[in-house]
Image: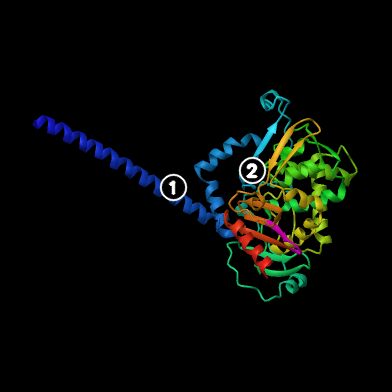
């Protein structure tokens, strides 16, 4: 009897110990995950100097060394995260619907990325901690535009502006003339410039320019040799925020500018970026400078919420930009036969996303290590149309901030 009681007692003790042990492990795991989540949330609200320090510390960590080894073959150090936001590519590479086996394709010859003036992704090779913080001098135009009775609105973004796009009047602003990194909102200017240079039905053959994008770029997953139209490339750039599509457009546009169809890739892209900055001046903007066509973090590349608001006003006037950016997805069959569907990174236009806004009509997301989470959005209801520019917000805050501002515009 005693032996039986002893056995039963032992089983109970062991069983209870296992249960409590599991509970303890889960509690510890939950605490660790919760702590990590809070750390991530905090990291999205850091100042420019704090971000630089974190990047510098990270550069000395073992994980960074391992990352450098992984991407050593591409001779580039990753310095930012460029607009990877749950975008999905559904691609059918042949009539059977099976994806092409990329291992069967010969690897393209790598091209030199050591460009001294850094007009594309981190080409100058500098550590962000050594970059000069951009500075701007506010001129009279922004001062006059921002001389309003500013409403009291609480948003997460470090910089923002709300504009009535029907009359250009500023309705709200927050640090709207402070310099910020533009991330992929840059692609609105890329779109404006390419539309001035060529027709939507022009044929573009994807080339070595797509090697210029950073390893962690958001992509339209283009392959060298594919042929598609300018309009298709615009969709690949503006919906899934494809940096490869931005470079394909820039190379094509640059060769038109240079009047040389066989112009070197680097020269063509540089000519295009120069044209982007000429367009900035044409719009009367003094506080924006682009270094590449995709917005990937680069020293000397900056804008302000005010300037991006003006650029966005120009973009929304273009029917094709609005037509593309108000869609939640787009399917294209390339001229070379590939069947591809791209989905939008802008959750405001995606029904069922959790932050869908029924009046939203575009425009462009952006995200990078130094830019934070950005969103240039437009909304329209009857005769009302507004543009909200959210720069350097949090991952979730940019959606909430945008809706807050757009709703304010609709109600006032």
Helix, strand or loop for the magenta stretch, by majority: strand
The residue that appears at 77% across and 59% down in the rendered structure is 311
Q: Residue furthest front?
A: 382
Q: Which residue is mark 1?
A: 33
| Element marked by disc 1 | helix
Q: Is residue 133 among what the camera can see? A: no
> What's the magenta region?
376-384
The mark nearer the N terminus, 2 or 1, is 1
Task: Residue 335: name its quadrant.
Answer: top right
What's the mark number on residue 257? Answer: none
Q: Which residue is mark 2?
A: 87
Provide residue 10's location: percent of width, then percent of height.
Answer: 18, 34
Provide residue 118's location: percent of width, then percent of height.
Answer: 72, 48
The residue that appears at 43% across and 51% down in the rendered structure is 35
Q: Is residue 85 among what the camera can see? A: yes
The residue that appears at 75% across and 58% down in the rendered structure is 312
Provide residue 189's location: percent of width, then percent of height.
Answer: 77, 53
Q: Is residue 288 magenta?
A: no
- Could you tell me which quadrant the N terminus lies in? top left
How many C-alpha atoms fall within 10 Å of the one at disc 1: few (<14), some, or many (≥20)? few
């Amino acid at each position: 009897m005693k032996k039986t009681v002893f056995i039963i007692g032992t089983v109970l003790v062991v069983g209870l110990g296992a249960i409590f042990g599991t509970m303890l492990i889960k509690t510890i795991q939950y605490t660790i995950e919760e702590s990590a989540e809070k750390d991530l949330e905090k990291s999205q609200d850091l100042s420019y100097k704090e971000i630089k320090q974190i990047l510098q510390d990270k550069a000395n960590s073992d994980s960074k060394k391992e990352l450098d080894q992984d991407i050593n073959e591409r001779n580039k150090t990753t310095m930012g995260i460029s607009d990877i936001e749950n975008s999905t590519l559904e691609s059918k590479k042949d009539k059977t619907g099976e994806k092409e086996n990329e291992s069967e394709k010969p690897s393209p010859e790598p091209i030199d990325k050591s460009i001294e003036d850094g007009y594309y992704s981190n080409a100058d090779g500098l550590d962000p901690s050594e970059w000069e913080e951009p500075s701007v001098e506010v001129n009279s135009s922004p001062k006059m535009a921002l001389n309003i009775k500013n409403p009291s609105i609480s948003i997460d973004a470090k910089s923002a502006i709300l504009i009535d796009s029907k009359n250009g009047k500023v309705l709200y602003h927050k640090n709207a003339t402070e310099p910020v990194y533009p991330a992929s909102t840059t692609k609105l200017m890329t779109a404006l410039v390419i539309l001035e240079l060529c027709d939507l039905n022009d044929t573009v053959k994807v080339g070595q320019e797509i090697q210029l994008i950073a390893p962690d770029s958001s992509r339209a997953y283009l392959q060298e040799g594919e042929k598609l139209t300018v309009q298709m490339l615009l969709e690949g750039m503006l919906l899934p925020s494809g940096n490869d599509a931005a470079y394909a457009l820039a190379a094509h546009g640059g060769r038109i500018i240079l009047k040389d169809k066989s112009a070197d890739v680097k020269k063509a892209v540089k000519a295009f970026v120069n044209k982007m900055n000429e367009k900035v001046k044409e719009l009367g903007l003094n506080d924006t400078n682009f270094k590449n066509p995709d917005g990937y973090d680069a020293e000397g590349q900056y804008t302000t919420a005010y300037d991006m608001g003006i650029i966005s006003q120009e973009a929304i006037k273009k029917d094709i930009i609005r037509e593309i950016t108000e869609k939640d997805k787009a399917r294209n069959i390339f001229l070379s036969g590939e069947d591809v569907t791209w989905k939008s990174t802008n959750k405001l236009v995606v029904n069922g996303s959790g932050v869908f806004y029924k009046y939203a009509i575009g425009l462009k997301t952006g995200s990078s290590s130094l830019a934070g989470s950005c969103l240039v959005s437009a909304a329209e209801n009857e005769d009302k149309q507004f543009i909200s520019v959210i720069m350097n917000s949090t991952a979730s805050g940019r959606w909430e901030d945008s809706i807050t501002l757009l709703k304010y515009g609709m109600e006032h």
